[in-house]
Image (cartoon, rainbow, N blue to C red):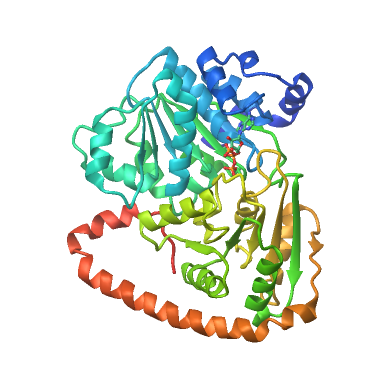
């Protein structure tokens, strides 16, 4: 039998399992066999009962099986893989026990926070290893032999190749969060390389809201007899999310944007744009019009990225304008609305973007701006969702009243962008030495084109 067929046959398909889990509806983490200190940590985090993906994935992972977990955005996948790992660690403590890979730096920090919140009661040591941060301090952190490493693949590879005394030869668990992204073409080759540097006899857990079913991609993760646990049917958005779109001519895009942002004033929102440049420009445009907007994209320095996210999380800024670097995994409970300034070229990215709101049972809304150039992409997304979305109603005359003022702000924004670019160019010529060139290549896996 070819390897392709083997993976398929070994998978326990989810549909039947689904029903059993729903019928039994497990009421507590104790019922799942989770040890008392971790149950206590769940209580402290206000997790009253396990979510459906936790109900299904935790027992399977605790049996020592490889898991492919598919569940909607905001449904508690992080704890679904963190809890069985922490329990196994408690039973047999060891340094460098588990490694969690994430596609973006911000997500890596967030996952480690969840591990620490659940694991501090059992004395967990966790290290975050991501690009854009000084290698030396990370090497020191690795020297302290953490139990769990949460990393972006490029920087982890850098340490495996260059940090003396660091290896993952004793690793017991490998997790790929947002696994479909990690197994795709951009990350694939580096994941292949990483897998050669960790033991084959490990447990592998793959999780995502848009999990690939492509056998070739799954083979890349070299799973052993994986169990597939799927709570949602493929690519579903949550029921508490109200999704709509707005259709208008391209030339009024910024005017419509400003009208909508103004209409939703007081709400917390993420505006997604396709390029770093547009992200920056839209943030400046909105700021010039008096809105508290902050940009987040892969061309910013890591400290600016974390600073921007922090301002948004703490409420100091109510609008985050971001590229898809913020589309996956980020868990910010206060997000009321996701606004797609640009329609994503990949339907999966749509699912992840709108999943930044309506998390953990809360309500939320999303609004996609569609122009004559986006129709094909938009219809493809509706096709993937399997439903037509409602059109958002606006008073077009009221929108047009803003056009002149927005035009002025656009011109100001273009000037500011020019200054910004000039400043960046200066900094680059001053600061970058050729010796750092090689490291940048792997470090900046989650950076984007401008
Ligand atoms: N059992 C639970 N009860 C209540 N809240 C929970 C429970 N488990 C997790 N949560 C909370 O739900 C939120 C979403 O969880 P998490 O970020 O793990 O979602 P996710 O499924 O990984 O989403 P995404 O696909 O967007 O990455 C978090 O704030 C988390 O603390």
Quadrant (top left, top right, bottom left, bottom right) of the C terminus? bottom left
State left or right for residue 79 relative to residue 185: right
In the image, residue 244 lies at what x, y percent? 76, 60
State left or right for residue 22 relative to residue 299: right
In the image, residue 15 lies at what x, y percent? 74, 31
State left or right for residue 285 relative to residue 97: right
Q: Quadrant of ligand 1?
A: top right
Name which residue lies at 42% across and 48% down: 105
In the image, residue 208 lies at what x, y percent? 58, 41
Q: In the displayed structure, would residue 65 be above or below residue 108?
A: above
In which quadrant of the rendered view does residue 25 lie? top right
Q: Nearer the viewer, residue 444 or 117?
A: 117
Q: Nearer the viewer, residue 201 or 316?
A: 316
Q: So how many labels did they put on this image? A: 0
Residue 13 shows in this picture = no
Q: In the displayed structure, would residue 207 be above or below residue 41?
A: below
Quadrant (top left, top right, bottom left, bottom right) of the N terminus? top right
Name which residue lies at 69% across and 73% down: 259
Name which residue lies at 30% across and 49% down: 133
Q: Nearer the viewer, residue 34 or 362?
A: 362
Residue 406 shows in this picture = yes
In the image, residue 345 lies at what x, y percent? 60, 63
């Amino acid at each position: 039998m070819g390897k392709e067929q083997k993976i398929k046959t070994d998978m326990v398909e989810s549909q039947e399992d689904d029903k059993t889990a729903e019928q039994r509806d497990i009421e507590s983490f104790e019922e799942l066999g989770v040890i008392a200190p971790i149950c206590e940590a769940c209580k402290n985090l206000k997790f009253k009962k396990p979510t459906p993906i936790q109900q299904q994935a935790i027992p399977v992972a605790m049996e020592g099986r490889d898991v492919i977990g598919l569940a909607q955005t905001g449904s508690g996948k992080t704890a679904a893989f963190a809890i069985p790992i922490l329990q196994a660690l408690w039973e047999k403590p060891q340094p460098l026990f588990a490694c969690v890979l994430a596609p973006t730096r911000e997500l890596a920090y967030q996952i480690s926070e969840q591990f620490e919140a659940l694991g501090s009661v059992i004395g967990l040591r966790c290290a975050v290893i991501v690009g854009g941060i000084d290698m030396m301090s990370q090497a020191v952190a690795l020297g302290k032999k953490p139990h769990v490493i949460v990393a972006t693949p490029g920087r982890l590879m850098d340490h495996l190749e260059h940090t003396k005394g660091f290896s993952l030869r004793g690793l017991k668990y490998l997790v790929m969060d947002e696994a479909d992204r990690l197994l795709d073409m951009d990350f694939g080759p580096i994941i292949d390389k990483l897998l050669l540097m960790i033991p084959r006899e490990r447990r592998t857990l793959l999780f995502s809201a848009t999990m690939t079913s492509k056998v070739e991609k799954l083979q890349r993760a070299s799973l052993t007899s994986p169990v597939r646990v799927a709570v949602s049917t493929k690519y579903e958005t949550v029921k508490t999310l109200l999704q709509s779109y707005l259709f208008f001519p391209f030339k009024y895009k910024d005017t419509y944007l400003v009208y909508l942002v103004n209409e939703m004033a007081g709400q917390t929102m993420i505006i997604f744009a396709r390029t770093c440049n547009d992200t920056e420009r839209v943030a400046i445009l909105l700021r010039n019009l008096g809105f508290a907007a902050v940009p987040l994209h892969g061309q910013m320095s890591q400290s600016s990225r974390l600073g921007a996210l922090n301002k948004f999380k703490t409420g100091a800024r109510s609008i985050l304008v971001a590229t898809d670097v913020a589309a996956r995994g980020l868990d910010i409970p206060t997000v009321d609305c996701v606004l797609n300034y640009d329609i994503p070229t990949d339907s999966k990215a749509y699912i992840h973007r709108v999943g930044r709101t309506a998390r953990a049972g809360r309500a939320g809304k999303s609004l996609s701006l569609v122009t004559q150039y986006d129709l094909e992409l938009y219809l493809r997304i509706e096709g993937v969702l399997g439903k037509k979305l409602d059109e958002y109603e606006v008073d077009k005359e009221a929108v047009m009243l803003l056009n002149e003022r927005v035009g002025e702000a656009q011109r100001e924004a273009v000037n500011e962008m020019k200054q910004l670019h000039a400043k960046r160019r200066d900094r680059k010529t001053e600061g970058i030495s050729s010796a750092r060139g090689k490291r940048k290549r792997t470090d900046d896996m989650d950076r984007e084109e401008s």
